[in-house]
Structures are given as structure tokens and as C-alpha cells.
Amino acid sequence: MLVLGAAAGGGLPQWNCTVGASGPLWSADKAHLHATQSSIAIGTDGHWTVVNASPDIREQIIRQPLLHPTSAPGDAPRRTPITRVILTNADLDHIAGLLSLRERTAFDLVATRTTLETLAANPVFNAVAAARRISVDIDTNFSLHGGCKARLFSVPGKTPLFLEPSGGTPEVGNRTEETVGLDVRSGDGKRLCYLPGCAAIDDEVRRQVHGSDVLLFDGTVFHDDELARAGVGEKTGRRMGHVPIAGADGSLAQLADVEVGRRIYIHINNTNPIWQPDGPERHEVERYGWEVAYDEMKISL
Ligand code: MLT
Ligand code: MN
């Protein structure tokens, strides 16, 4: 498994931002610390599933030789090892990259019916006509390559930002098909759970991730009010559909007793202090056994 993009929407640094972790990363010698937007890839042997199509997908493919197009003599001239894209929601940082996959090569586009309806309602995605839309039901296994099985499960979530009622406040934390987690089981029974967006942690979330060998979990914000602290916005993490890391209701405390192998924060916003390798917040998450994802991180199941 590969982390293609460890950052939340906006990436690191974010185009308009000089505070938080973004500030120091605008100097040319810091390019190796940049992080692209939210995506992972799962696969082997020339068959890869990309989970969430980041706006940075072209750069992510270029950086990752395993995802490069291949063609042996006699093959079609355009061939990609990416045979499937799974979406965990219809947030822009997870769907905008579909528009970069529009060059007529077929692949399976797997998501809940709700997420596929969101795409269907927006004609710009008609440009990705070669993608075979495959709607899967919650809690129903489907096959990936190499003997892996996958399953989507619903988590407390939120409607995509671009569909929020204007002037109103959307409901946050409902368990609908809009926001899901992905559970992947390898042929030999190893499990990976990936939840880049999760608005709250309750017993059901704990039950779903319990026993996974690798948990990749929503690390968008460390403090719920982190955007306000940085002077860049009023919305809390929870209002954006992301449970914070810190605090009694945060993921550090709420997942502390759940049995998992590796626990890794992903979908990390550029305001999140855990980007600082020597900062107190990074040390705190590490004390709880968490790792912090980075672009091109390789994780074997
Ligand atoms: C989120 O994770 O909350 C979304 O990516 C926000 C957005 O669409 O900009
Ligand atoms: Mn996002």
C-alpha cells in the first residue's frame, strides 16, 4: 500500500497560505517536505486501486513508478496499472482528480450510490466517460486484485462542502452513505482500514476498526479550533466533518483502547501542528503509538 497524498484538501503548502505548516515550505529547498492531497493506492503485480482521486493525482502518478503506464510490444499504446478508483466521499479533494483521468482509458469507479449520484448530477464528470460506475452497498464485500476483498462502511460524516446549503449549517455526524470508511482484507486475512474523514468516534467506529493491522485515520486537525487559532477561518474541525486529534472526544483518547496494529494519521490539514517533526503535538501523538503519514510512505500489509 502506498500513501499518494498525506495532506488534507489544500495540500502542504496551500496555495494561499503562509501560516501553520505552510509558511516555511515556500522556500525552494523545502520541496521535499511538501505533501499532496488525500489519496492512497493499494495493489501489486501491475494492478492498482487508487482510493480517492486527489487534485494532485497526475503528480502522484509521476512520482510513483509502480503507477506509471506500461506497454509491452504489441500492447495497446495506452495502458495503465490503475484499474480501479474507490471514493470514500465526494469531497473535492477526493473527486477533482477524476478529471485528470479522462483520456478514454477504462477503469472501475467504485463508490456508494449516493456518491455516484453526486458525480452524475455534475455534468463536468461526463468527461470521465470511460470510467465504469460501480455502486456498492455498505457492508458488502467486493473483490480487489490479488485475492484482496474490500468493504465500505458508513461513518459519521458530512455532505460535501460544495453541496452545503448556502447560508445554512449542514448536519454533521450523520451516518449516511455520503462518508464511508474502507476496510481491505488481504488474501491471508490482514486488514487495513482507511477513514480520511470521520466526524465523531462512537462504539460503532471503534467496532469497525477493531482488529485491523493498519489503521489510517482522519488527522485533519489537532485542535478542534485550530483554524481560528491560526486566524484562517472560523470553522471547527467537527463542523468540517473531522473529529480533532486532541481532547476528551478526540481520536487520541477515543481510539486509545482499540486494538489495532499500526495507527497512522492521514488527511492532515496544513494548520495541523503534527506536521512539525519535533513539536510537542507530534511527540504527543507518538506517545499514543501513532505515526504520521507522508507522501510516498509504503505500508506492507
Ligand atoms: C474536507 O475534507 O473537509 C473537504 O475536503 C473540504 C473541501 O472540500 O474543501
Ligand atoms: Mn478532505
Image (cartoon, rainbow, N blue to C red):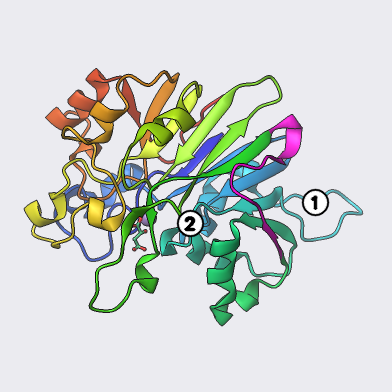
Residue drawn at (23%, 18%) of the image: 287
The local crowd at label 2, few if under 14, some if 14 to 19, many if 20 or more residues have their Cα within 10 Å, is many
Magenta stretch holds residue 273? no
Residue drawn at (33%, 38%) of the image: 201
Q: Which mark is residue 89?
A: 2
Label 2 beta carbon less than 8 Å to ligand 1 = yes
Magenta stretch holds residue 139? yes
Amino acid marked by disc 1: Ser
* Magenta span of residues: 132-148
Q: Residue 119: image x %, image y %?
A: 56, 70
Say above or below: 166 vs 231.
below
Residue drawn at (43%, 45%) of the image: 155
Where does label 1 land, which residue?
A: 71
Q: Which quadrant of the figure shows ligand 1?
A: bottom left
Q: Which of pointers 2 and 1 indicates the residue nearer the eye?
A: 2
Circle 2: element type? loop
